[in-house]
Image: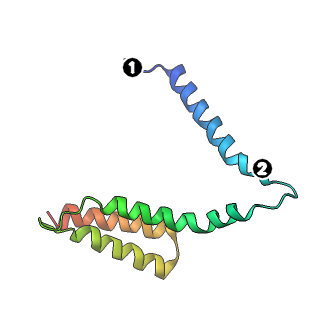
């Protein structure tokens, strides 16, 4: 059953409102002169690294070390992304060039 244009617009509107509310909730709760609780500050400090670690594990979960190419493109791409990020400290650059590099590896080099 195809989705109609008004239905699509309604879905986009609901998603936009929910996104706005969740983003604005922190300012509503901690805005003004209220002090941000220590637990929230701690989570803001440790969660970004934990989320990146989970994403790396998720991306590398499909490596098959006993069959060609033995996970080489993935591990090489991870090393390139890490090196680019250490060198330039630019998330967009390291993720973008790392993705392009990985795609070249799997489509041209390790065919």
Q: Position of residue 22 (x, y in %)?
A: 66, 44
Residue at 58% from the left image edge and 35% from the top image edge: 15
Q: Which residue lies under the disc numbered 2?
A: 29
Q: Are marks 1 and 2 in contact (CB under 8 Å)?
A: no
Q: Which residue lies under the disc numbered 1?
A: 2
Q: Position of residue 109 (x, y in %)?
A: 18, 68
From this view, report whether residue 3 is shown above or below residue 52. above
Picture quadrant of residue 101: bottom left
Q: Position of residue 26 (x, y in %)?
A: 72, 51
From this view, report whether residue 57 is shown above or below residue 9. below
Residue at 12% from the left image edge and 67% from the top image edge: 66
Neighbourhood count class around disc 2 (C-alpha, 10 Å): few under 14, some 14–19, many 20 upward: few
Q: Position of residue 71 (x, y in %)?
A: 21, 68
Horizontal side of 110 relative to 26 (left or right) equals left
Horizontal side of 2 relative to 48 (left or right) equals left
Picture quadrant of residue 99: bottom left
From this view, report whether residue 88 is shown above or below residue 108. below
Residue at 44% from the left image edge and 66% from the top image edge: 53
Q: Secondary structure at mark 2?
A: helix
Q: CA distance from mark 1 to mark 2?
A: 41 Å
């Amino acid at each position: 059953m195809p989705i109609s244009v008004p239905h699509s617009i309604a879905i986009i509107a609901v998603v936009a409102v929910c996104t706005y509310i969740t983003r604005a909730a922190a300012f509503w709760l901690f805005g003004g002169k209220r002090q941000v609780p220590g637990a929230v500050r701690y989570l803001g400090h440790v969660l970004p690294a934990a989320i990146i670690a989970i994403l790396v594990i998720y991306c590398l979960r499909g490596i098959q070390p006993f069959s060609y190419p033995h996970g080489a493109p993935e591990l090489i791409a991870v090393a390139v992304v890490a090196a680019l990020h250490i060198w330039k400290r630019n998330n967009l650059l390291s993720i973008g060039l790392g993705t392009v590099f990985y795609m070249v590896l799997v489509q041209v080099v390790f065919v």
